[in-house]
Structure formats: C-alpha cells, structure tokens
Image: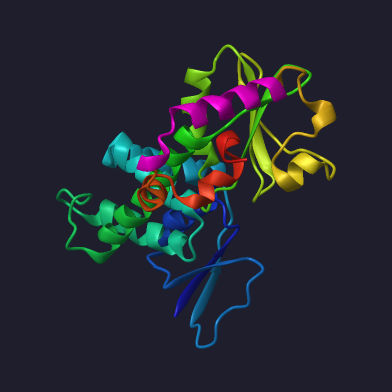
Amino acid sequence: MVVFQYDKSFEGLLCAVFEAYDKKKYPESLISQEQIVPLLTREVFAIETQTEKFLRVLTLLKNKMSVMELNRLNAVWLSEIENSDFLLFQYIKYAIDSKFEHSANFGHPVVLEIHKIAKKVSKEVHAWQQFVRFQKSKDEIYFAPVHPVYNSLPLVIPHFKDRFSSQQWILYDLKRNYGFYYDLSEVHPMVLEGSGEHLRTGFVDEEMLHPDEKLFQELWKKYHTSVSIKERINLKLQKQYMPKRYWKFLTEKQ
C-alpha cells in the first residue's frame, strides 16, 4: 500500500495531488504526520505543504471545474467526515484524468458520494441561515451561538455579512470554539478566551446584555405565542422542517 502523510490542511491535500502526479505514485491512504503508518505499507511519502505547488493545483482545478463544483469540494472538506480528504483526492484525480464531463457522472461512486456529503453540509448551512438568533450585548455587538455538526460556519458568513451589514455581530461555533466577528467593514476570524457562561450555554451573561435585550426577547416570545394556533400545532411536522437540535438557541423555545 502507498501512503501519503500530510499536515491535514486543504493546501496540504492539493500538494499531495501535485506530488502524486509528479512521482506517478497514487496513495491508497492519506494520514496525518502524527498517525501511525498502517501495517503492510509498501511506501510512505511525507508531503510538504508548499504554496507554489498548492497554487498550481488550485489554478488547474479552477480551469477544470465550475465555481459550483469548487464550492462543492469546499463543502466536503468542511464536513470533517472521516476519510473525506481521501474521497476528495480521488475526485480531483478523476476530474483531472477525465476527458469528459465528470461532475454529473453519478454512476461513479466517488462522484455520488461527493454529492451526498455536499448536500448534507449545504442543508445545514441553509438551516443556520434561518435558525440563528442574535443577543445584543452592552457594547452594541450582536452575538449568536451555533453548534453545527459539520464545520459549516465559514459557509454562512457571506449571508450574514450581506443581510446584517449595518450591525456588528459575532457568529460563534461552540463545538469547535471559534467564530467570526463583523466590524461593519470586514469579517475577522476570532477565538473567545476564558470560560464565560456564554461559551458553555451559548447565552450572553445577563450583566453583559444590552438593557433592551430582555425586553425584546419577551416581546418576541409573546408574538410567537400570539400567532400560534394551539389546535394546529403539529410537533412531528415542526421537527421535520426544523430539527430539534436547532431549538437550543431559539429565543421562542426558551
């Protein structure tokens, strides 16, 4: 078996593609530099991440694939599903070698699996665009926690930047402990330090809330209750369109 070891970054993955074609050795497994090499391994190659090689492969992919297809690859990478990096390697190799349209060849198992994973991530992105609830802090920053299954937070940022461009906000992934801060101009990646209550529960500490925030939360709950028709509540259907895992941070569900 041929094994490639790399740093588990996307740049490193594209460098692995470069090295495979350069050496004419194609891996049967991709592992991190810290992982133990599997038994029965015939050859091991340590892949060094180099900007020049990464950019050459990226340029090739941009010429070979549509923007939609590149976005699909990005979604699969962010899925963090086990062995999704090797699946991407196989897909990229198939795309480079193919003389015909490859992205819609659902008879190819790798193409089909790429579409399935990208669809799952896309579904989660769509859900977070609908089910995020901001809490306004004393310093006029809107904070919203998310707890995604996939590492989909980067994919929802353009939506919120367009929609809430007149407000400072933070979208924070509690599961992975990182987020993005919008300062009315640019979006910056960030990590919250410490062990505040908001990092554990997802709710801003009461002493840090804006004086009006509690009032608006109560108004929103009353509005939600007043427009609900008890006789027509269908929890099964509600869970189908709004899975219960998104309820945790919804103001109207507190």
The spot of residue 186 in percent (x, y) is 61, 19
Q: Does residue 219 lie above or below 37 as drawn?
A: above
Q: Tell me which segment is drawn in magenta.
A: 214-232
The spot of residue 159 in percent (x, y) is 46, 26
The spot of residue 149 in percent (x, y) is 52, 53
Q: Does residue 85 lie above or below 210 as drawn?
A: below
Q: Is residue 47 left or right of residue 208?
A: left
The spot of residue 36 in percent (x, y) is 63, 77
Q: Residue furthest bottom?
A: 40
Tell me which corner region of the image, top left, top right, bottom left or bottom right, holds residue 94.
bottom left
Q: Residue at x 59, y 47 (%)?
A: 147
- How many numbered circles does the render carry? 0
Q: Residue furthest left?
A: 100
Q: Can residue 151 be seen in this view?
A: no
Q: Closest to the observer: 92 or 253?
A: 253
Dominant secondary structure of the residues highlighted in magenta in the image? helix
Q: Does residue 163 lie above or below 252 as drawn?
A: above
Q: Residue furthest top?
A: 166
Q: Which residue is drawn at 67% across and 42% down?
A: 178
Tell me which corner region of the image, top left, top right, bottom left or bottom right, holds residue 138.
top right
Q: Verify whether residue 176 appears in magenta.
A: no
State the scheme by which the image is colored. Answer: rainbow
Q: Can residue 20 be seen in this view?
A: yes
Q: Which residue is drawn at 35% across and 62% down?
A: 90
For the C terminus, give its image quadrant: top right
Q: Closest to the observer: 189 or 225?
A: 225
Q: Is residue 174 left or right of residue 73?
A: right
Q: Verify whether residue 228 appears in magenta.
A: yes
For the N terminus, give its image quadrant: bottom left
Q: Residue at x 83, y 45 (%)?
A: 195
